[in-house]
Image (cartoon, rainbow, N blue to C red):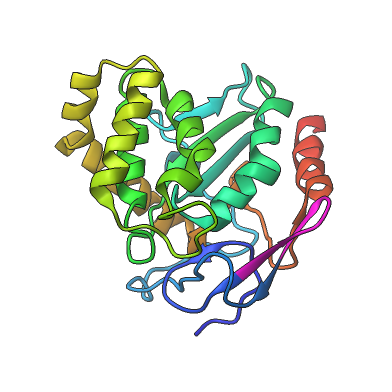
Amino acid sequence: MPKSSNPVTKRGGASINLVLTVIVLVVAVGVIGGVLYAKGGNGNQQQPGPDQTVPAAVLNPPDANTLSKSPDGKVVLTEFMDYQCPSCQQFYQQLTKEMEQKYQGRITYVVRNYPLAQAHPLAEPAARAAEAAAAQGKFAEMYHQLNENWSKWAVDSPGAQEPSSNVQRAQQMFAGYAQQIGLDVNKYQQDVSSPAIDAKVKKDMADGDKAGVSGTPTFFLNGKKLDFSSGVSKQSFYGQIDQALAK
């Protein structure tokens, strides 16, 4: 069992409790919040060092989905996320939803899939839904539907602690979101189970492994992995982005 205070959900181990203050996200080891999973199966893979810059080809390939694009591409923030992850949901509600709007058009904000299927049975179906929407040019719309309605599909009932495993119910909801955002639902249904979408999700996972991702959410700013071992505040998070913009 790894020792960790990071506000992320990892592969393989103990539970964590997300404690939200006015602007600070800190995590204490506990039994209430998301499940902390230690990454397994890649122990022999060489991981980037803490100060090493991960190549853009790994983090931000041409087909990666974006929530924001800057004309100059000067500052690129990449997030590896799991849509069913409670930690990712907390980040979305408390930080990244606001951040997306705050820096819209000023930074390139890339979102990659890293579903932790062992812990979150609906993470991969949700990733497929997002990618099927992206195939019709509406990734951002589905991304927001999945996050805004998280308590309806990711857990069996609002306020529940354990992740839902009801794939059929979730897929029906995702198809409903597809209709709401104006997708061709027949094409969506074909794409969501297609080999191309499967390959896209697996490619994101493989790139995450190359980048040293071990849990979600994991962020890279201009190729450098952000360290949340001591918690994260809006002030510090935005400060790093502002500093990169000022260079």
Closest to the observer, 203 or 167: 167
Q: Position of residue 210 (x, y in %)?
A: 41, 56
Left or right position of 145 against 236: left
| 87 part of magenta stretch | no
- Report whether residue 103 is seen: no
Residue under the image location 81 percent in, 39 percent down? 243
Q: Position of residue 181 (x, y in %)?
A: 41, 19
The quadrant holding residue 242 is top right
Vertical placement of residue 36 versus 95, above or below: below
Residue under the image location 27 percent in, 36 percent down? 172
Residue under the image location 18 percent in, 20 percent down? 186
Residue under the image location 36 percent in, 75 percent down? 44
Residue furthest out toward the bottom: 1
Left or right position of 8 against 204: right
Q: Position of residue 165 (x, y in %)?
A: 31, 58
- Report whether residue 114 is seen: yes
Which residues make up the magenta segment? 17-26
Vertical placement of residue 92 versus 246, above or below: below
Magenta highlight: main SS: strand
Q: Position of residue 224 (x, y in %)?
A: 62, 50
The quadrant holding residue 93 is top right
The C terminus appears in which quarter of the rendering?
top right
* Marker count (numbered): 0
